[in-house]
Each structure stands twice: as structure tokens, then as C-alpha cells.
Image (spheres, rainbow, N blue to C red):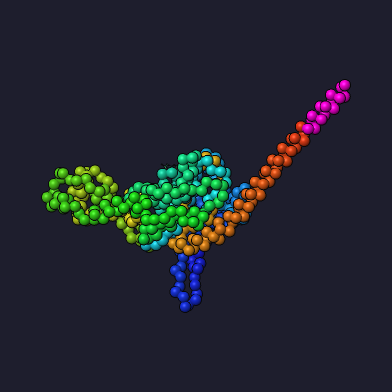
Amino acid sequence: MARAGAPRLLWAPWLVPAALATVYFQEEFLDGESWRNRWIPSTNDSNFGKFRLSSGKFYGDIQKDKGLQTTENAKFYAISSRFKPFSNKGKTLVIQYTVKHEQKMDCGGGYIKIFSSDLDQKNLNGKSQYYIMFGPDICGFDIKKVHVILFYKNQYHSNKKSIRCKVDGFTHLYTLTLRSDLTYEVKIDADIIESGNIEEDWNLGGLRKLEKSALKMPKKLDKLSQNDQSSDIPSQDWNKHFLDASANKPSEWNSELDGEWQPSVIQKPNYKDRLKSMKMDNLDYKDIWLHQKIENPGYLQEFELAEYENIGVIGLELWQVRSGTIFDNFLITDDENYAADFGQKTWGRTKDPEKEMDMIQAKEEIKKAREEEEQLIRESIKEKYLQTQHVKDEL
Ligand SMILES: *[C@@H]1O[C@H](CO)[C@@H](O)[C@H](O)[C@H]1NC(C)=O
């Protein structure tokens, strides 16, 4: 894995220096079997399918096109790779990779997942909590879509605009861009296929507004906190999340690596139970601080829409009926131009030769089939001839 520090630095002093790209993760599988040191297969299920390094039956460049290929039919797959944790707060986040279903996909996932660095890689499975899921999913005639699923407020949210994926057997470049102004873009093969506003296209606006209005303590509760009565409280969203004031900072917490520590949040308690526990814990009502928090399996931090702390693992966790899919050219960066360049230098350079090789193979197959057919015809003519000779001899 290369960590490009300053890939596009301009030295010309008369130009305003271009912003430097930060590459969080880049993987092209160019160093033989060394990928096995970087990618950890999950052992959560001994029946998980195995990956191998392969450029497939046809390719544009036998070396460059090597990627992780699924090798066993009707299996679940789970493998992941770790990088230095980062937050995309206030930054652009670009997630990009190539995927090729050379087996002519009938039913199976071709997507990737992005996780918090808290993920236990050896235990990765379908229930492992992820931040982002992105990429194609195909099953029969019904499902041919690009998933863009964002984790927010303890739930997974799918994009409401449906995005069609590629279904042919060639390598395709998938790019997801999430920007801090809450716009996004989905590209396939460097073309913008979908774009818009994250709040709108994931139906998250409503959730967000509730959160904002909730920052003000509802009058009824304010009164309640003075009168200390526990009747007739409207069930409002604000009481679904509040800080666990009894939580202590974990001793292994590293503020430099993990960011500023915040206590976890107690989620969706029954209203009356909550009141009871609030009284019991002598919790100051006014300290209730509403904001997005997640249930805290590790030290997951609060985040705004599509803002994630501690992003640290990329993984493939999927099911395939017929295997043969190749994943390659993974990239996570904060720079859209860098991603576009990287896409052109990888997929951009090998896509046409890949098609040519496939065409040549197809032609050869047709030729071979024709030759076999001609051979059969020759043989049957010969046989008929011999039969007539035989008849003659008998006469
Ligand atoms: C697999 O993961 C599940 C859920 O995290 C867990 O309950 C189970 O014990 C794990 N199995 C193994 C063999 O580690």
C-alpha cells in the first residue's frame, strides 16, 4: 500500500499552491502475495469463501489488473484491511475501487464497506457495524443497483434515488464522493451517474431537524425538572439520546489517536424508566445534551450527517452465488482530482486492452466452434462414404 504524501505538489512560486491530497488508503496489489500481510480474512465462519490474487481470464495488463478474486461458488466472503484512522469532518471523502464480474454475475455483491478502526477484523461478519457501504449488487432481474448506505443515528440509511449498476463482465470504476457541504456524487467509469444533497437523497433532513429543535429543552420537561413530576410527558425524539453521565473515560483512550473523548449515549430508554434512572443517578436535566451518538461498541464518536470519526478499515463482506469477481484499485482520499487521476492511471489505462482481449478470445472461441463443427461434418461425410463403399463391396 502506497501512502502518497504529496502527489501533486506544484513548486511554481507564482502559482497558489494546490491543496495537497491526503491518501488514507491505496491498494493496487502490485507486490505479489504480500497483500496477505495487509488483508485479514475473517475467521468468524470457517465456511467463508477464499480470495486469491488474479487478473482473470482476460485483462488489459496481466500485472496491473491483478486484484482480489472470489474463488468459491455459493459462499459468504469477509476480508478487510486497516489504515491509519482519520475523520472526514469538514473534508471531502472519496471512496473508489474497480470491480469486474467476469463470471457474468447472476446473484452476488460487488460492494465495499468502510468501518471504524474499532472493527475486530478477524471477526468481521454480516452483522459488523459499518459506516458506509458502497457499490454494485446484482441478483436476478430484480436487483441491479449501486448501494450507497450511510450509518447515521444508529441506523443504516439507503439512498432513495436508485442507481443502476453495470452488469457486464468488464472492469468498472466506482467512485463515491461525500463533501462537507453535504453534496455527493456517484460516478461509474468516471461519469457522474447520480449527485445531489445528502440530506435530501437519504431522507436525513427530518432526523437532523428533530435534533436541532431538540437542543432546546422542551418546556414541559423544563417545568417537570422543577416540579419533579413524572406524568403526561409527550414522547418526543429528544429523549431518545442522551449522554451517559456516569461513563468514565477508558484508561486506554488516546486523545491524540482517538480524538476528544465523549461519554457514550444511553439510547431510547422507556420514558418512565428514564425518568426514574435520571432521578436515581441524580442527573442534572440541564446537562442532557442532544446530538448524534452511537451506541458505543467501542469509542465511536458523535458525527454529523456523513461525518465519521475514526475511519480505519475497508472490507469486503458479501455473498456470491457464482464466484469470479475481481476487486482492485482501492482508494480512499480527500482529493477528488487525485481520485480522478488515479482512476485514469489504473482503470483508464487497462479498460480498452481488456475489451480487446475479451474480443479476441470471443473470436477464437467462435473460430474453434466452427472448426469443430466442420470436423464433425467431415467425419460424417467420411462415414457415409465408407458405408456406401461397404455396400458396394457386399454387392
Ligand atoms: C462470529 O461473530 C458473532 C457476532 O459478532 C459472534 O457472536 C460469534 O461468536 C463469532 N463466531 C466466532 C467463531 O468467532
Residue 59, given in percent of the width and then of the height, sits at 61, 52
- Asked which quadrant contains residue 371, the reply is top right
Q: Is residue 386 magenta?
A: yes
Q: Is residue 185 visible?
A: yes
> Start and end of the magenta stretch?
381-395
Residue 104, given in percent of the width and then of the height, sits at 56, 43
Residue under the point 44% across and 62% down:
334
Secondary structure character of the magenta stretch overall: helix
Toward the viewer: 178 or 162? 162
8 to the left or right of 295 = right
Quarter holding the C terminus is top right
Q: Count of labels shown? A: 0
The residue furthest left is: 227
Q: Is residue 162 magenta?
A: no
Residue 392, given in percent of the width and then of the height, sits at 86, 25
Residue 38, given in percent of the width and then of the height, sits at 52, 54
Displayed-image quarter of ligand 1: top left
Work out whether 255 lies above or below 115.
below
